[in-house]
Image (cartoon, grey):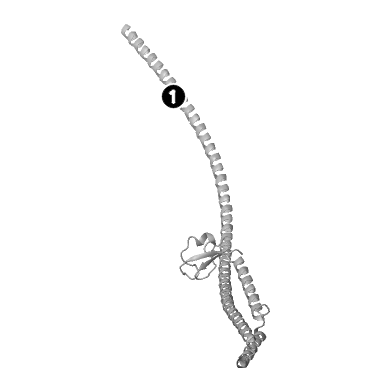
Amino acid sequence: MKQLRVAMLDMYRKHAGLEAKLRHEHNIRQQITEQHQKRATESANKIMRMTNNYKSMETGYNCRIRELMASRAALNTVLRQTEGKISTLKTELEIMGGRERNIRKQMQKEVMHFEQKYRECVAQQHHQQKEHETLIQQHNELRVEMAKLHSQRDAPRDESRYQALTNALKKVLAEFGSPEDRPMFKAMSAARDCGRAMLFEALKRSECAVCYSNQSNSVINPCGHCAVCTECIKRLNKCPICRVKITSWVRIYV
């Protein structure tokens, strides 16, 4: 009997120990469950915050993307307008360049024409000057002969020669007149002045054929072209118009 009581006491003690152990394990399990719930709640809150942040960021990104797309559309519109304006300006520039080339060609032709006219006038002036000098020399020779014959007019043998020289002198004076009143030289002077005025007017309108900015004010020898300025002719060896080698040049003041 006594042994039974001891056995029951042992079993009771063991049962109490097991219950205490179970209560301890239950408490530990409950703490772990609470910790898991707490962590789950914190994770859910964190996920919710992250979701809200993501949604707000997505909304901001969408707004920014829409703004960028609108800006891109506006920039594309401005770019197309600018390209249209550039094309129009290029077309106008080509037209203006063509007109400028035509004007330069026309001006060069006019300058060459006036230069040719001026050279012809100068050549004609030299020729007429020589004729004038020849006529003056003949006039003086006739005057000398008339003076000699006048001193010897008593000699019957020279009477016919004196009369012939007198008639020839009268004929020359009647045909040409005095050198100051001759219409040929008046016309020559008027043509020379007109040619010079036309040439100077053309030179005023002309530009340098090299730099296209300064006025052409240099005459090239031996061709006589006036198509470059004094700054550009110092760097040239040949005429830009006819490609003749430049021997010298003269600056003109218009």
Viewer-closest of 122 and 62: 122
Residue 143 place in picture, x, y as percent: 63, 83
Q: Residue furthest front?
A: 154
Q: Amino acid at mark 1?
A: Ile
| Element under disc 1 | helix
Instruction: Give the total number of marks visible in the rendering.
Output: 1
Towards the viewer: 213 or 177:
177
- Counting from the top left corner in percent of width and height, residue 149 is at 62, 87
Mark 1 is surrounded, within 10 Å at the Cα level, by few (under 14), some (14 to 19) or many (20 or more) other residues, namely few
State whether residue 194 is above or below residue 151: above
Q: Position of residue 193 (x, y in %)?
A: 64, 73
**Residue 160 image-quadrant placement:** bottom right
Q: Residue furthest left?
A: 3
Name the residue tied to disc 1.
32
Above or below residue 139? Residue 197 is above
Note whether 77 is above or below 220 in the view shown: above
User: Where is residue 82, by image quadrant?
Assistant: bottom right
Q: Could you say where residue 26 lies in the image, as x and y percent from the top left?
A: 43, 21
The quarter of the picture where residue 3 lies is top left
Give the position of the C terminus as an image quadrant: bottom right
Q: In this rendering, does residue 216 appear at all?
A: no
Q: Quadrant of the N terminus?
A: top left
Residue toward you, 118 or 64: 118
The outermost residue toward the right is 181
Residue situated in front as seen by the camera: 121 or 82: 121
Residue 162 is at least partly visible in this image: yes
Give the side of residue 193 with respect to residue 11, left or right. Answer: right
